[in-house]
Image: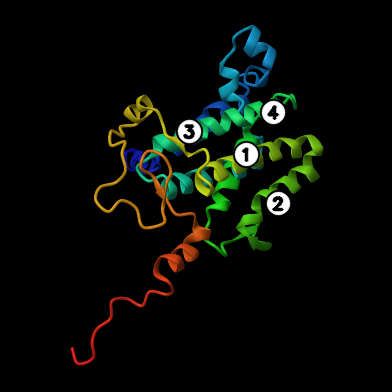
């Protein structure tokens, strides 16, 4: 039974597995009162003056208490797994690197806010990118009661944080959405930041990705974007336009002559 459980764990993409394990490793000891919560909060003075560097890491993975932690953990797994499996297949190093850069952006945006925990901002960044890359017309539900386009999910979460936590909580969520927008815009939409999204060689080697270049003969499909390190992505909302531009209309196939 233990082997089958570990086999299921190994099926999870490596970066998503790391994120989920980090969330459990940081949150559970605090909830069980094994580790004082003040030891894992981000306090700029402790980081810069006392060199308690671990606070940067732990502040991104300290979850809520009670049932909110279950919801946040499920959201972290679902969004990260979807991104890594669908948009970064066999390129987890690029995903890890771009996630690291997004974390730096979140940190920079939240230092003026005096934020102690960056978990919610990280969740909003992942949710924003995932919703932007969802197929056109994708729907999601709010506790099974309200169905709406998944594109609006980040804004719904910001609104919930405003109602439940006030302007301060909403500002943290907005910082995550801003970082997520920069990620999506710079890598998937315009490609303006694509060159920065390629993982360095040491990270590729660590994750066992030795290929490094684009795919073999044929490469990506026409109109696809190279998202650093050979990851080819077609932004879903452009698929139809690109197909129409490439073929001049709907492709009916090669066809057969009558009588054959």
Q: How far across and how far down the image is residue 106, in percent?
A: 63, 31
Q: Residue furthest top?
A: 50
**Residue at x-position 48% and y-position 66%:** 240
Q: Which residue is mark 3?
A: 196
Q: Earlier in the sequence, mark 3 or mark 2?
A: 2
Q: Residues within 10 Å of mark 3 (few under 14, many from 20)?
A: some
**Residue nearer the viewer, 178 or 143:** 178
> Could you tell me which secondary element the residue under label 1 belongs to?
helix
Q: Is residue 96 left or right of residue 159?
A: left
Q: Which residue is mark 4?
A: 110
Q: CA distance from mark 1 to mark 3?
A: 33 Å
Q: Nearer the viewer, mark 1 or mark 4?
A: 4
Q: How far across and how far down the image is residue 73, in percent?
A: 57, 41
Q: Earlier in the sequence, mark 4 or mark 3?
A: 4
Q: Are marks 2 and 1 in contact (CB under 8 Å)?
A: no
Q: CA distance from mark 2 to mark 1?
A: 18 Å
Q: Nearer the viewer, mark 1 or mark 3?
A: 3
Q: Is residue 259 left or right of residue 76?
A: left
- Label of residue 197 in the image: none
Q: Which residue is mark 2?
A: 156
Q: CA distance from mark 4 to mark 3?
A: 22 Å
Q: Which residue is mark 1?
A: 69
> Could you tell me which secondary element the residue under label 4 belongs to?
helix
């Amino acid at each position: 039974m233990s082997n089958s459980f570990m086999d299921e764990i190994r099926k999870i993409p490596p970066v998503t597995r790391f994120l989920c394990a980090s969330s459990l490793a940081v949150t559970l000891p605090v909830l069980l009162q094994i580790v004082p919560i003040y030891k894992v909060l981000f306090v700029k003075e402790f980081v810069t003056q006392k060199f308690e560097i671990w606070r940067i890491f732990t502040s991104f993975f300290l979850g809520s208490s009670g049932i909110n932690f279950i919801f946040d953990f499920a959201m972290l797994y679902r969004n990260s797994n979807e991104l890594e499996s669908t948009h970064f297949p066999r390129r987890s190093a690029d995903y890890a690197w771009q996630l690291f850069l997004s974390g730096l952006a979140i940190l920079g945006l939240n230092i003026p806010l005096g934020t102690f925990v960056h978990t919610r901002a990280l969740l909003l960044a992942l949710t924003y990118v995932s919703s932007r890359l969802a197929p056109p017309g994708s729907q999601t539900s709010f506790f099974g009661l309200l169905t709406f386009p998944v594109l609006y999910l980040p804004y719904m979460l910001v609104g919930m944080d405003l109602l439940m936590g006030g302007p301060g909580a909403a500002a943290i969520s907005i910082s995550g959405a801003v970082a997520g927008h920069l990620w999506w815009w710079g890598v998937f939409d315009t490609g303006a930041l694509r060159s920065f999204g390629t993982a360095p060689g040491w990270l590729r080697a660590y994750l066992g990705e030795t290929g490094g270049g684009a795919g073999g003969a044929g490469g990506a499909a026409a109109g696809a974007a190279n998202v650093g390190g050979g990851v080819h992505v077609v932004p879903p909302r452009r698929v139809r336009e690109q197909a129409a531009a490439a073929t001049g209309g709907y492709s009916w196939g090669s066809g057969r002559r009558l009588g054959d």
